[in-house]
Every structure is written in C-alpha cells, then in structure tokens.
Amino acid sequence: MRRSTGFALPMVILAMFVLVGAIAAGFAMISSERSSDDSLIQAQAAAALAETGLQQGLRNRLALGLPAVPPASGDSTRVDLVGGYADVVTRLMRPAVIATGIPALYYVRSRGVRTRAAFPGIGPAVSMAGAFAAFTAMQMDIQASVTSINGLRKAGGSGFVSGADECTGDTIAAVAVPASPGFTATGGGKGGGLSTLIGRPKVDTIGLTPASAATGIPFDWSDIVYRGAIQATITIPNGGNPTTYFPSGSAWDAYPTILVRNGPTGGTAISLGPGHSGKGLLIVFGDLVTTGNFSWDGVIIVGSQLTMRGTEDVRGAVATGLNAKLGLPVSESDLGIDELAGNTKLRYNSCLVTSSMTSLGALRAYQNTWANNFPAY
C-alpha cells in the first residue's frame, strides 16, 4: 500500500486562507458600519449647521455684516461655525405693498457644510434649510412728542413742543410726565412756556411719580442696558468724543443706531452740537446735553437727564429718564429736570420714528414654511 505524503501542509494553508478571509471580512464589516454611522452623524451635524445659519440669517443680520432690511437684489454671507460653516442667502420674492400694509416676502436659504469627518478622504456632509419670512420692525409705543419720566421744564416763550404728527396729520400729547415733578413752564408771557405746547392734550399725566410712570413705559430698558438687547451700528464708550464715532455723508441715510454707554450711573454727560446733527436712533445711557443748531431726525432716548440750551430742531420723538425703570432714583434733586430753553423745536413725526426703529427689526419666518428636504448643490 502506498502512503500519502504532504496532506497536512495544504490543509493548514487552506485553513489560514479561510481565517484571514474571515478576519478581513470582519474588519471590512466594522469599517463599513463605522463609516455608515459616521455618515449619519455628519449628516445630522450638517443639518444642525444649516439650521443655525438659518436662524442667524433671520435674527442676527447686523452682526453678520448685513443690512437690517435685505435689499431688493438680495444678499448672502458665510457664517463660520464650530465644525463647519453655513452659507446664508436671502432673496426677495415679493416687494412690500405700502398702500395695503403687506410686508415684503423673502426666502432665506442656509446651506450647512460639515467640514470635520472621522474618516480621511470622505467629502464634507451638506444639508439645506430654508423658510419664507417677512421683515418686522420693532414697535415703539409713542405717548407724546416728549415723554419724560423725570419731569420736564420749558423755559421762555420761544420754541415749541408739538404733538401734531408731521407724517399723518394726527395729534398726540405734546409732553407726557408724572404728576410729580410734572411739567414746569417759566417765562414767555401769558401762559408761560405752556403756550409753546401743541398737542391733545398739551400735558399728559402718565403716573403719580417717576417710579409709577416708569412701569407704564412699554420699553425693556433693562435688557438694552444690561443684556445688550440692541445691536447698535455705532457704540460710543463713556467719555468718548462723538466726533470720532459719528458717521458722515450718505451713512446717515441708513438711519443708524448710535449707543452711548455713559451710564446708567457714574457716567460723563455727552455733549452734542451742530456738528453732530444726524438722524436715526440715539440711545444715551446717562446724561445728554445739546447746544447750538443741533438737529436730529428720528428718536432720542436718554436714560437720565436731557438738557437743551440752543436752537435745536428735533423731528421724531424724545424719551428721557428711563433709568427709573432700573429702580434708580429720578427725583428732581437727583437727576434734575430736563431743561428746554432758547428756540428749541421738538416736533413729532411718526414716519421718522418708524425709519429709526427699522434697524431694530428682524426677519420673522412664517409658520409651516421651514423645509430641509430639498437637494443641495
């Protein structure tokens, strides 16, 4: 009988091939599962980036370097985010119909790109999100041409404070003050300074004291002062020279928001003269003094005391003494009374008020218009 030789070695080699194949298949399966899991994770991350970009494009346009109101031609920007970025595009779908009050319709699209992946050689995950939106400006409840929580004094018979709306022809109160310290009129012949008020009524009482008057002013002053609720176009620090910060030329056409951080306590009064005339929303945390031929079209909001001593001409609306809303004392002995002297003219204009508040508005998405199920290119 012949003996078979060399049988064991081929069997061992065959078994090794089987084992190696099984191990390789196992690694391939694990790698495939990890790749699939990572793809799902990256897709979810890209969707989160797209949603973040969409929310930024709707609510935070000024911080992104975009105009508050999107232009007719639309605009776009890239938002850098952790782990990727979002390209936000805004397009005008339908212009506003001024006669009927229908706002402009926009479509805001965000393309989120996840640039960080666990496996090399894999392209970035991409997701899209979009929504239809309309621009809504912040509203300001205007009670009078001049609303002064800390009282108001008008000296002399020249100049005037008018609640007759230059825009619509309606008439509101000339001044609104608490019963104490109230409105004080001095000089100016018969009727004193009271004869220089135009409005229905001339003087509106909004509370017994500054503290009670403050509660009736629907303006979240605390959020503005302490929590940065307003994204200002220009911010002037305490003691800053306004000439250094104020814009010039066509920059005023956008009705900028200028924030003066000289308060609410311990700040230096900011002084504005004719060289600082402009338009927009002027917010002063502390005291404001104006002189000469200073003029302003829009809204002036002063936390403490406003003093006008020249031939100022303000069209829009003025509010002072808002630091009372912070619980700070606003009695006559602490903050004083506003002084309106000389030929100061304060004229209510609702259109200029609206234009000044426009930069504080935001795009608001319509309900049930959000979508993320369309192709990304």
Image (tube, rainbow, N blue to C red):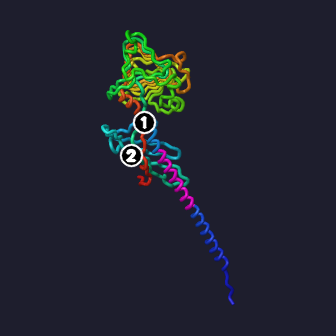
- Quadrant position of the N terminus in the picture: bottom right
Q: Can the viewer see residue 228 in this picture? A: yes
The one of 107 and 103 positioned closer to us in this rendering: 103
Q: Residue at x 40, y 30 (%)?
A: 356
In percent of the image, x 46 and y 51: which residue is there?
Answer: 127
The region drawn magenta spans: 31-53
Q: In the rendering, which numbered label is found on residue 186?
A: none
Question: In this view, which residue lies farthest toward the left?
Answer: 99
- Amino acid carrying label 1: it is Gly
Q: Position of residue 275 (x, y in %)?
A: 39, 18
Q: How many marks?
A: 2
Foreground label between 2 and 1: 1
Magenta region, main secondary structure? helix
Q: Return the x and y of residue 27 as percentages of the image width and height.
A: 59, 63
Q: Residues within 10 Å of mark 1 (few under 14, many from 20)?
A: some
Secondary structure under the numbered disc 1 in the rendered image: loop
Disc 2 secondary structure class: strand
Q: Amino acid at mark 2?
A: Tyr
Q: Depth check: give the residue in front, 369 or 23.
A: 369
Q: In the image, residue 24 lies at what x, y percent?
A: 59, 66
According to the picture, the residue beneath numbered tag 1 turns out to be: 361
Measured as percent of width and height from the top left, residue 289 is found at 46, 17
Q: Earlier in the sequence, mark 2 or mark 1?
A: 2
Give the answer, above or below, for where 198 lies relative to 52. Answer: above
Q: Which residue is mark 2?
A: 107
Residue 57 shown left or right of residue 226 in the figure: left
